[in-house]
Image: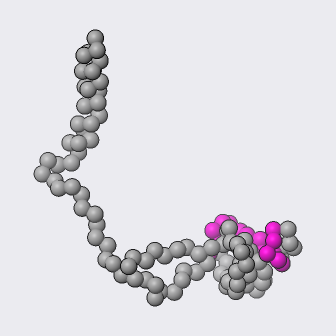
Amino acid sequence: MRSTRIAVSAAILGAFVVPALSATPAGAAPAAVAAVPAYSCHHLPPLPYEVHTKAVTIRSKASSKSTALGILYKSHRFTVHKKSGNWLYITDRTTGIKGWVSGTYVYRDVRVCLS
């Protein structure tokens, strides 16, 4: 009985493994890793800040409890003047409002440099 279980288990395992192994042509070499040219991108300017949600509140101070001055929408362009912790002091170029926004919703994408 034990040998029957082993034979059945091997048959079931073979049913799953053989198709996966046969998906690669017999004469094919292992897949080579694509060569990426090594260069440095540290000379490129940093990526711009973007709003990564529909909208974020512009506040008078770097606190979620401070007075709301306006709303910075995803489509608005803005300038970052300084950073304090996770808060950014910005100017909304669409409306001209200056104030603080949370860095949780407004941040830079990161460029990965290979060197």
Q: Residue sitting at 23 percent across and 36 percent down?
A: 18
Judging depth in this view, the residue of 41 and 72 nearest the camera is: 41
Q: Could you tell me which quadrant the C terminus lies in?
A: bottom left
Give the side of residue 66 with respect to residue 49, left or right. Answer: right
Q: What is the x, y in percent for residue 62?
A: 79, 75
Quarter-of-image position of residue 102: bottom right
Quadrant assignment, res 22: top left
Where does the magenta region start and end? 50-64
Magenta stretch encompasses residue 56: yes
List the single residue furthest toward the left: 27
Q: Residue furthest front?
A: 2
The residue located at (61%, 78%) in the rendering is 49
Quarter where residue 7 is shown = top left
Q: Is residue 46 above or below residue 66?
A: below
Which quarter of the image is occupied by the N terminus? top left
Q: Nearer the viewer, residue 106 or 5?
A: 5
Q: Residue furthest top?
A: 1
Q: Is residue 10 left or right of residue 26?
A: right
Residue at point 63%, 68% (across, down): 52
What residue is rendered at 26% in x and 26% in y?
Answer: 10
